Image (cartoon, rainbow, N blue to C red):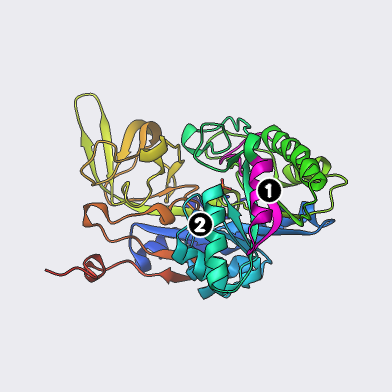
Amino acid sequence: MNHFRRRAGELYCEDVPLEAIAAQAGTPAYVYSTATLRRHARVMRAPFAGREHLVCFSVKACSNLAILSLLREEGLGFDIVSGGELYRTLEAGADPKSVVFSGVGKTAREMAEALDAGILLFNVESEAELRLLDRIAGQKRRRAPVSLRINPDVDPRTHPYIATGLKRSKFGIPRSRAREAYRLARALPHLDVVGLDCHVGSQLIEVAPFVEAVRELRSLIDELVDDGAALRYLDLGGGLGISYRDERPPLPMTYGRALCDALEGLDLTLLLEPGRVLAGNAAVLLTRVLFRKDADEKRFVVTDAAMNDLLRPALYGAYHEIAPVQRPRRRRETVDVVGPVCESGDFLAQDRELPAVEAGELVVIHSAGAYGFSMASNYNSRPRPPEVLVDGDRFRIVRERESYRDLVRGERP
Ligand SMILES: *Cc1c(COP(=O)(O)O)cnc(C)c1O
């Protein structure tokens, strides 16, 4: 289900023509659909209705305040990976008790801020981090609730940059050291050991790796209970994939049922940290064609969006569908869609067969809602684009286009 559809050939977001958004917000611009975000939040929660659970949206996927508060309204919590993300979730009105803090390199300052806020728990990724968190909590005369992130050594069969649960990955505590790490955690005076966490990777298009991870963690849970641990939370991370091209990832219902089956008989509150599956297909990047350009062996379409606006194609060779906003021409041609940035890696698509587009026309890059704006930069001193949120037949700019003034903020000539 997708709220970007054509009417009489022209592309709309919900009931708003994208042409109207470009006229008001300019291009490039990120355009999000409220109905899609709300629906994704609901289908993600539905399979877990029968058990204690909290779905924590992975803020790094898409961190605009308007979107965070919309997801908060849908009953979601948040998975953060920095002090900046903590700040955003609190600004968006999140209950701190719905926030979990992940990440392999939390600083003392970030730990202190999260303790002051009173978050639900820290997902701790190493023995050294346990010791630092214990010290900071002690200084504050507080207790820090912790889960240990265990690396289940499961192959997610996804892109190597987003596979995080393998033995050679920097993430998590190896399964072989997990019991020892729990002993340490329980011996430290200012920590409350409340759970177990894992995250096997991103853009997974099969259920099996998730189920394998649950199996690994259950064997560990048995050992920990033998050791006398009293656990309350099991966090299975995020990672459910979406269809960018022709992938057929499991539906959230299928994924959820498989997890519930694998968790049968286990009386722990389930935490999940989905990002991409909630936000990915909820936005497009709207851009205008600046020029067409023919080289000896290639034909280029140069757009006003570039790798600084949407990094995924340049970073991962990721595929994003591209389509004209107005009725697609019958004539098709094979082109590279590229931005103005001075890098050969600055492309949005390569050797892509598309309906012919002319200079001045609008095109969209689909599935840009996750790791889109949140990965945008100012490279080439390009102001970052605005974010627009559509709701039915209305839309509003939920983040303004940056100005040249914004580009030099904090600099001293
Ligand atoms: C990135 C990340 C997520 C979200 O991953 P998605 O693939 O977007 O669902 C969840 N948990 C952790 C720890 C992460 O690093």
Quadrant that contains the C terminus: bottom left
Q: Which one is in front, 161 or 247?
A: 161
Q: Which one is in front, 69 or 390?
A: 69
- Indicate which label's residue lies in the foreground, 1 or 2: 1
* Marks 1,2: beta carbons within 8 A: no
Relative vertical location of residue 11 with respect to residue 216 in this rendering, above or below: below
The residue pinned by badge 1 equals: 183
Relative vertical location of residue 259 with respect to residue 166 in this rendering, above or below: below
The quadrant where residue 223 appears: top right
The quadrant where residue 193 appears: bottom right
Does ligand 1 reach within 8 Å of label 1's beta carbon? no
- Where residue 401 sits: x, y (%)? 33, 66
Does ligand 1 reach within 8 Å of label 2's beta carbon? yes
- Secondary structure of residue under mark 1: helix
Give the mark, 1 or 2, whose residue is nearer the N terminus.
2
- Where residue 57 sits: x, y (%)? 60, 58
- Where residue 237 sits: x, y (%)? 63, 48
Kind of residue sitting beneath label 1? Arg
Q: Is residue 352 left or right of residue 366?
A: left
- Where residue 317 sits: x, y (%)? 40, 34
Q: Residue at x 69, y 67 (%)?
A: 75
* Cα distance between the residues tagged 1 and 2: 25 Å
Q: Is residue 60 left or right of residue 252?
A: left
Q: How many marks?
A: 2
Q: Which one is in front, 209 or 46?
A: 209
Q: Is residue 361 magenta?
A: no
The residue pinned by badge 2 equals: 81
Q: Which residues are magenta?
A: 178-206
Camera sees residue 394: no
Q: Is residue 193 magenta?
A: yes
